[in-house]
Image: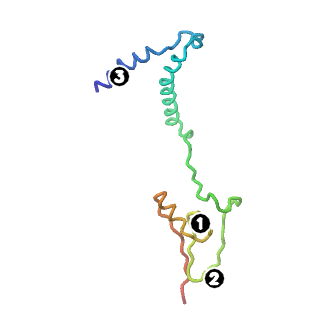
Amino acid sequence: MQLLAGLVKTTLPNYLAGLPIPDSFGGWFRLGFTDWLSLIPPTAAVGGLVYVSYLAFCPEARPKPSTKVNRSIRMAEAKVVDMIDIEDIAEKAAFCRCWKSKNWPYCDGSHGAHNKECQDNLGPVVVSRKKN
């Protein structure tokens, strides 16, 4: 705790007092190259603090992750709908639910790579016909 107190009471004020901040507007134009270099760290720290505060108090400013599931299948359509007659299915069929199948709407196992990458548990919908 004494280390933090010394930093706040002594080190930081001495550092800030040693910065080459001019007394007038025209003084900014008379600063040398090394003076400008010494102003970069505190300026970056203040800018970072302002940015983090902005993100904390303005949640609408945070970037939103993409929630889109379908990123490649028939994107020109407003809604992707497939009609499959149950009579056309031999015994059973596996239908894709991950939107990554190259054989849409049938599952081709693409969810396996997705599950490994995202720690997810997607799988197909399996439709089967009862035998009479």
Above or below, comparing residue 130 to residue 110 in the picture: below
* Cα–Cα gap, marks 1 and 3: 58 Å
Give x and y (percent) for residue 94.
Answer: 56, 74
First-in-chain label (1 vs 3): 3
Mark 1: amino acid: Ser
Quarter-of-image position of residue 33:
top right
Above or below, comparing residue 72 to residue 38 in the picture: below
Is disc 2 surrounded by few (<14), some (14 to 19) or many (20+) residues within 10 Å?
few
Left or right, 11 with respect to 31, comes to left
Most extreme residue toward the front is: 33
Identify the residue at image location x=69%, y=59%. 78
Mark 2: amino acid: Glu
Is disc 1 surrounded by few (<14), some (14 to 19) or many (20+) residues within 10 Å?
some
Question: Which residue is under mark 2?
Answer: 87
Q: Which mark is residue 7?
A: 3
Q: Nearer the viewer, mark 2 or mark 3?
A: 3
Question: Which residue is under mark 1?
Answer: 101
Q: Nearer the viewer, mark 2 or mark 1?
A: 1
* Cα–Cα gap, marks 2 and 1: 23 Å
Q: Which element type, helix, strand or loop, lies under badge 3?
A: helix
First-in-chain label (2 vs 1): 2
